[in-house]
Image (cartoon, grey):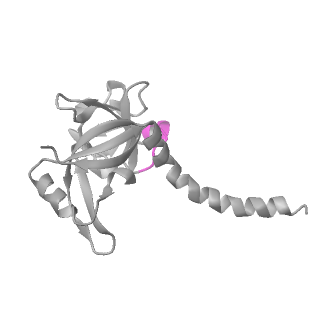
Amino acid sequence: MRRFPKYFLAMLLPLAVLLVRPVTPAAVLMFGQEIRLSTRPVDPRDIFRGDYVILSFSIERVDMSLLREQDRDIFSGPSTILSHNRRRHNLGPSTVHMYVTLEPDGEGIWQPAAMALEPPEAGVYLRAVASRGRISSTTVNLDYGDFLRRFYVREGTGGELEDAALRGSIIAVAKAWRGRIVLTSLEIPD
């Protein structure tokens, strides 16, 4: 009978690992603030998965002038990250974690307003990763993670969304919370 707790924990551990992955998007959907982003799809169909849209966002390319002044010392020039600052900020050899503060523009579309190496104390922000080769002296291309890359749609609607995006008239509705983001829907404005 003394072995039962050990076996129970051994069975519970893989289950806990499997359940951790969906907890983050569920928390974002429950507690997150709704934001609207301008998009452009890349591919409307997958023969095995049905209709989906791979999205490209305007917030993925951010001007380096939005980087806080005290964080600028991490970059010594185009595509170069200083190694001593990389160690100080606990960064990997080829990636930089950044936090992008978003604010709505006049049309209600959220745009980058600031960028820093630490999360801001207030406001809506997203955690992003920039790889070494995607940083220049003027812009940085950011990756916001899996939950912003692909959105599955009802069968037969992928082509309609692609056509609307090619006209520049598609909006992604998402929820953001504590630097995480999850897409909730795609809209074609009238």
Residue 48, position in %: x, y?
Answer: 33, 74
Residue 162, position in %: x, y?
Answer: 16, 58
Residue 163, position in %: x, y?
Answer: 12, 58
In this view, the residue farthest toward the bottom is: 47
Image quadrant occupied by the N terminus: bottom right
Q: Nearer the viewer, residue 172 or 147?
A: 172
In this view, the residue farthest toward the left is: 167
Q: Is residue 100 above or below residue 136?
A: above
Which portion, as a residue range, is magenta?
85-93
Res. 42 image quadrant: bottom left
Q: Residue at x 34, y 50 (%)?
A: 148
Q: Nearer the viewer, residue 144 or 163?
A: 163
Q: Is residue 11 above or below residue 129?
A: below
Left of 28 or right of it: where is 58? left
Queried whether the magenta region covers residue 20, the answer comes back as no
Q: Residue at x 70, y 59 (%)?
A: 12
